[in-house]
Amino acid sequence: MPNNIVRATKLNAQLQITQLKYASEAKLIKLKQDNGWNLTKGAKRGRLEIIAEILLFCDQRKAKTSIMYKTNLNYAQLKSNLKFLTSQVLLTHNTGKYATTEKGHRFLELFAQLNDILKDENT
């Protein structure tokens, strides 16, 4: 009987984590679609926005060139940001490709929450 209780507790914990991931994924998808960083209005991106864009784009393994073009950075900026993100373990680098880590996904969750708070303040 105690084994069943332990299994049920583990399953419940896994379900809660899964629900949390889906909720945060929905926020991240919304952030991807409408990130509020409309460069045509002349607004400049800050470092956190650039980091978030790189992490969002690297949800699947990506090469430097595709990251550079997608995030609209020059090579020196890209190299500096990738070095920083890998040193902070927000990105992993394996066989020439970069991918967002769990810590990077956590950063994106917090960034999305902060973005929501700031949007609420402006409206």
Image (cartoon, rainbow, N blue to C red):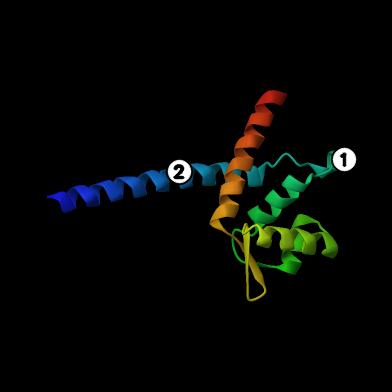
Q: Residues within 10 Å of mark 2 (few under 14, many from 20)?
A: few
Residue at the far front in the pictured view: 87
Decide if residue 94 is in sight here: yes
Amino acid type shown at disc 1: Gly
Q: Which residue is mark 2?
A: 20
Q: Is residue 51 left or right of residue 61?
A: right
Q: What residue appears at the point 66 percent right and 62 percent down from the top-left corner? A: 86
Q: Residue furthest left?
A: 1
- Give how far across and how far down residue 25 sits, in percent: 53, 47
Residue displayed at 19% across by 47% down: 5
Upstream in sequence: badge 1 or badge 2: 2
Residue with the mark numbered 1: 42
Quarter of the figure with residue 57: bottom right
Foreground residue among 74 and 30: 74
Q: Which of the pair 102/38 is nearer the observer?
A: 102
Front of the two marks 1 and 2: 2
